[in-house]
């Protein structure tokens, strides 16, 4: 059943809210938790062939062990550039080159770094909540406008406003759950 009424589309609002949650998941994936994750290297770009390219377009990234990442660089001429990019990415990683294979040991996190990462995770989740609330505000303003322009009754406005609020509450709860899960992951020793 489509939730669309004369210019109001609840499914579109929910899709935008899901996008905010998906962005948060992606940001959380890049936060280092002491465990090797290939997404840790996602933000790294390499200057290759006259362009800035994502690391995963110049080599294969794997996590063969819980505290080790490897990058199998496809072009021998890019090994030094990949090594340099990983070192200068500000992730606190110290890659070791072995031919075209780069091993990246993941050092254990200090207590201070864990607390700092928890604060960063909280900041990311707050940004996601703000995004969801902004989408809610857009939906509510559209409902008010439709009612004011007599394209929707007061009862329809109330019914749709309740659905928008329910969707907002569900997405904010999902964001809170993701944050709780990420903080637990970060603080595990």
Image (cartoon, grey):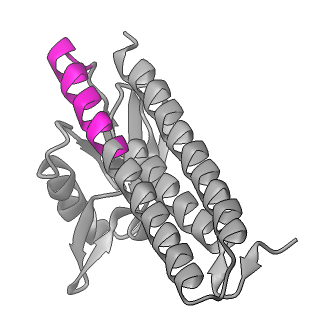
One can see residue 70 in this view: no
Q: Position of residue 51 (x, y in %)?
A: 24, 84
Viewer-closest of 79 and 45: 45
Q: Position of residue 38 (x, y in %)?
A: 44, 46
As for residue 116 lying within the magenta part, the answer is yes
Does residue 96 sit above or below 131 in this rendering? Answer: above
Q: How many marks?
A: 0
The quarter of the rendered structure image containing the N terminus is bottom right
Q: Is residue 85 left or right of residue 63?
A: left
Q: Is residue 63 above or below residue 99?
A: above
Position above or below: 55 against 33: below
Residue 146, percent across and down?
57, 83
Please state, as top left, top right, bottom left or bottom right, where the C terminus lies in the image: top left
Query: Which residue sits at x=14%, y=45%?
Result: 90
Where residue 154 sits in the image (x, y, percent)?
65, 70
Q: Is residue 114 magenta?
A: yes
Q: Would you identify the image quadrant in which residue 109 lies?
A: top left
Name which residue lies at 40% across and 13% down: 188
Residue nearer the viewer, 156 or 36 = 156
Instruction: State left or right for residue 117 relative to residue 11.
Output: left
Q: Nearer the viewer, residue 164 or 35?
A: 164
Magenta stretch bounds: 109-125
Most common SS among magenta residues = helix
From the viewer's perspective, tell me whether residue 50 is left or right of residue 135.
left
What residue do we see at 65% from left, 88% from top? 151
């Amino acid at each position: 059943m489509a939730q669309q009424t004369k210019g109001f589309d609840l499914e579109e609002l929910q899709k935008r809210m899901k996008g905010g949650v998906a962005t948060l998941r992606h940001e959380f994936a890049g936060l280092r938790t002491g465990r090797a994750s290939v997404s840790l290297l996602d933000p790294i770009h390499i200057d290759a062939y006259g362009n800035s390219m994502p690391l995963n377009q110049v080599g294969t990234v794997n996590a063969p062990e819980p505290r080790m990442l490897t990058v199998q660089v496809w072009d021998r001429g890019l090994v030094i550039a990949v090594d340099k990019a990983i070192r200068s990415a500000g992730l606190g990683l110290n890659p070791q080159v072995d031919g075209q294979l780069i091993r990246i040991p993941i050092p254990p996190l200090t207590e201070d770094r864990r607390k700092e990462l928890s604060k960063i995770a909280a900041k990311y989740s707050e940004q996601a909540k703000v995004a969801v609330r902004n989408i809610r505000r857009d939906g509510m303003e559209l409902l008010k406008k439709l009612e004011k322009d007599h394209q929707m009754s007061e009862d329809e406005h109330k019914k749709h406003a309740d659905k928008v609020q329910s969707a907002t509450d569900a997405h904010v709860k999902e964001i809170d759950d993701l944050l709780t899960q990420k903080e637990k992951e970060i603080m595990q020793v």
